[in-house]
Every structure is written in structure tokens, then in C-alpha cells.
Amino acid sequence: MFHIRANTRDNAISPERLVKLGITPATLGDALEHGEVCGWLAVDGADRAVGFCNVDPASGEVLVLAVLSGQEGQGVGRALLDAAVTHLQSVGSPPPWLMAGANPALRAHGFYRAQGWKPSGRRDAQGDEELRLDTH
């Protein structure tokens, strides 16, 4: 997951930056083991990891959706996001939401909107916008 996160086309985050954010293999492993985070991993035909999605079932937040650069446009992100949302809904999580870059030039900007996610109007300190899944 850390390799994929560092090698996305947009918004790549290095393992060193993740450590500064408190996200390490140990902390992520612990969160996954205790159910604080649930995750899905996509692999290609050669069993190579090409994408992943992690969620927080307690809050309904999609924490990260990342697809390896060069693997975009093949349905990997959509399949991962669908699996994550289905899981959140099946365990009774609050309505799904996520934070994403507000810049229309980012691939994620159009991707989430095409999947039915809509801006709530809230932005964080980095300027990312909150998107909520339109389930109506």
C-alpha cells in the first residue's frame, strides 16, 4: 500500500511523509487488525498490487483510494470504491464521505463526481473539500 500511495499520478505521498502523519506499516497494521480501518487491495493478472482503498467504518470516511500510476482508467478505482461503500453500508456506518482535492485539474475531482459524490461545502485547512455520496 505504501508503494502504491507513493506512486500515484496525482497526490502521491511518500512513505516519509506518511510517517510524519503518523501512518506507518505498524500503525496501519494495528488499525486493520482491530477493525478501526477496513481495506481492499486490487491485484492485476500477475498478482501485482495496483490499487487499494481504506475506510473508517466508525465514521463512514473513505480514508484513501489510490491506484498505481499507469493503471488508471481500467476500473480499479471504481471497483475498490464500490466495495468500500458497500461494506460501509452493510455494517451500518454513517453515510460515506471523503476529503479530496478541490482542483478540477486533479483526476479525483471528476472521478468522484462521476460516481455520484457531491461537495458538502466544507473544506479542511489544506483546501481539500468534503464529498458525500449522493444515495438518492
Image (spheres, rainbow, N blue to C red):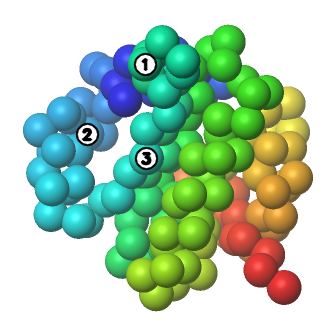
User: Horizontally, is 124 left or right of 61 in the view?
Assistant: right
Query: What amino acid is labelled 3 in the image?
Result: Trp
Viewer-nearest of labels 2 and 3?
Answer: 3
Residue 128 visible to an observer of this rendering:
no
Counting residues from the start of the chain, the first of labels 2 and 3 encountered is: 2
- The numbered dot on residue 23 is 2
User: Horizontally, is 15 left or right of 22 in the view?
Assistant: right
Which of the image's four quarters has the C terminus?
Answer: bottom right
Residue 8 visible to an observer of this rendering:
yes
Q: Residue at x 81, y 57 (%)?
A: 115
User: Horizontally, is 2 left or right of 82 in the view?
Assistant: left
Identify the residue position indicated by label 1 in the image: 47
Identify the residue position indicated by label 3 in the image: 40
* Place of residue 46 in the rendered image (x, y in percent of width and height, measured from the top left): 48, 12
Calculate the distance from the C-alpha at mark 2 to the C-alpha at mark 1. 25 Å
Q: Residue at x 72, y 71 (%)?
A: 133
Q: Residue at x 43, y 38 (%)?
A: 41
Which of the image's four quarters has the N terminus?
Answer: top left
**Dot 1: few (<14), some (14–19), or many (≥20) neighbours within 10 Å?**
few
Q: Is residue 95 above or below residue 2?
A: below
Q: Examine the image and state in which quarter residue 56 appears.
A: bottom left
Q: Examine the image and state in which quarter residue 6 appears.
A: top left
Could you tell me if the residues under marks 2 and 3 are in contact, i.e. CB atoms within 8 Å?
A: no
* Place of residue 25 in the rendered image (x, y in percent of width and height, measured from the top left): 19, 33
Secondary structure under badge 3?
strand
Counting residues from the start of the chain, the first of labels 1 and 3 encountered is: 3
User: Horizontally, is 133 left or right of 27 in the view?
Assistant: right
Calculate the distance from the C-alpha at mark 2 to the C-alpha at mark 3. 17 Å
